[in-house]
Amino acid sequence: KINIVDTPGHADFGAEVERILNMALVDAAEGPMPQTKFVLRQALKLKKKIIVCINKVDKPASRVDWVLDTTFDLFGCLGADDEACDFPVVYASGFQGVASNEGPDQLEKDLKPLLDTILEETPPPKIDNSAPLQMLVSNLDYDDYVGRICIGRLISGELRVGQEVGIMYGRGTAEGNVTKLWQFNNNDRVPTDVIRAGDICCFSGIGEVKIGDTVVDTQTPLPLPPIKVEEPTVAMEFTINKSPFAGKCKEATKVTAPQLKARLEKECLTNLAIRMDPGSTSESFKIKGRGTLQLGILMENMRREGFEFMVSAPEVLLRENPETGAKEEPYEEVVIDVPNEFQGVIMEEMQKKQGVLQSMEAGAVEDSTVLTFEIPTRCTIGLQGKFAQRTSGLQGKFAQRTSGNAVMSSQFSQWGPFDGGQVKLREKGSITTTATGKATFYSLMNFQLKGRFFVEHAEEVYAGQVIGLHNREIDLNVNITKEKAVTNVRAASASLNENLNAKVQMSIDDWLGHMDTDEVLEVTPVESRLAKKVAVEDQVMTPFATPRANFLTSTPLKM
């Protein structure tokens, strides 16, 4: 029986990878990416048997020999020993469902070579049925009828329905009885009465359990080392919706602070990389994670579940060096694949963001270059949005000057010295409305030369809402609800056919890359709105344009 678990490749979801590791998968054209390096580093730490599978060998641009050489070099750079460097290689095409051990031009009719390699190379689990019960909880699930469900692999002993077991965590112990027991068969859970060492199972019956706890025998408790994951690097504050439109969305069924807190606590239970601390008020909660992508997906899931809430702009977490006491900030390795004609643009923009070029090599596609930079994490916030074609001309010069052809990926690199400098998150200011009502065609036409708008004609807005992006670096306050004065005099331009530019569509991920530190994001099941933090909290608007705040990092954290 083979248990193959697929994990996310993005470094923001490293906690998912750190729990389950076994096989390395690389693209036949792109080769090892930053997430591949992250997964391989963790696998080598755990001394796992590594199988390299080169996927997409059927692509016209595949470079199998180059990818294999690059992968071998990556093993050497990460300090792998001779045994680890002598890794087995499988060539495959996931799209066609074929694989081979001999080469990319000798693919067989199915994936049997891949499965055979797993059986031959992966060592069998070291089990002892006579030893006391040991099972490390690797994941959690919840069912409305049976409650919390523990998922993990049985290291030793046996597990039976009705058996009394203990949970070891920290210095405490909790006890309970196994009420239901399941084993995995393909993608389904099958009820069973007994599970023996070496198999993956899930059971219910114990409420107070967390990921990393050990299920032990009550008579002979022998806990296993807990799961350790890397510390979070980015934080955002979640709070209830305080805008004038709060509670008006019919699809929003969860709008109170207790509901928000319960949902965030549930996420912390099932996701080791997410941490929660008290916020600035009793109705707010500070959520820490690996990156804006991870937190953005959490927000999207909550939105689809009927939650309505507000979040602050992402901020980077600092720490104190345990030896010197100096402030340190996280650095990331950023890899950008870009056509050669835009190489100079990327170099220029990354230099503005304090990026240091590490390497430069030919890309998988003809006339393309892969650039590798090391850059502070606080300088990468909003960088992803600059590559999106639909925000071209909005959030930066990457999309505008590369026509959306640049592709970026990143991963945590190291903790480095914090210089205390300020970095602009956005080069342009916001256009904010000073009145509540409906946006009028007349006002949108008058102000559309001032920038790009996030709202359209007849859309409801409230005072303090950010309705567009200004062409200049300062914020601009306008009355977007003003209507044209009605007179009996025919205007000279009345017969002209005027066209209004379409509004810019923004997703949660786009908002997180766009919002500044003086702004908050309102998330509802139907739509998302950006607003000025001061206007939402005090409902007071400044009647003139004000300079925008620079991006600041959070206060240091003691690790």
Image (cartoon, helix red, strand yellow):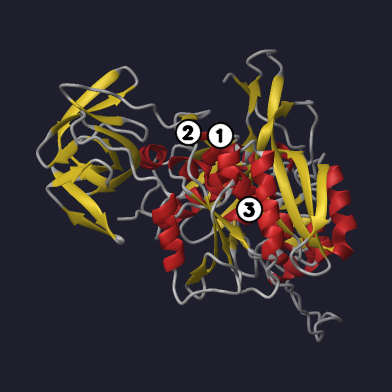
Q: Which mark is residue 275?
A: 2
Label 1 or label 3, whichever lies nearer to me, is 1
Disc 3 residue type (three-letter):
Trp
Where does residue 172 sit, x and y in percent of width and height?
Answer: 28, 19
Q: Are marks 1 and 2 in contact (CB under 8 Å)?
A: yes
Q: How many marks?
A: 3
The residue sitting at 55% across, 38% down in the picture is 44
Where does residue 544 sit, x and y in percent of width and height?
Answer: 79, 44
C-alpha gap between disc 1 and disc 2: 8 Å
Q: Quadrant of the N terminus?
A: bottom left
| Foreground of the two, 467 or 287 | 287
Element carrying mark 1? loop
The residue sitting at 28% across, 25% down in the picture is 168
* Residue 256 figure quarter: top left
- Is residue 299 toward the left or the right of residue 377 in the image? left
Name the outermost residue toward the bottom.
495
- Is residue 462 toward the left or the right of residue 129 in the image? right
* Residue that mark 3 sits on: 511
Up/down of 111 relative to 4, above or below: below
* Residue that mark 1 sits on: 232
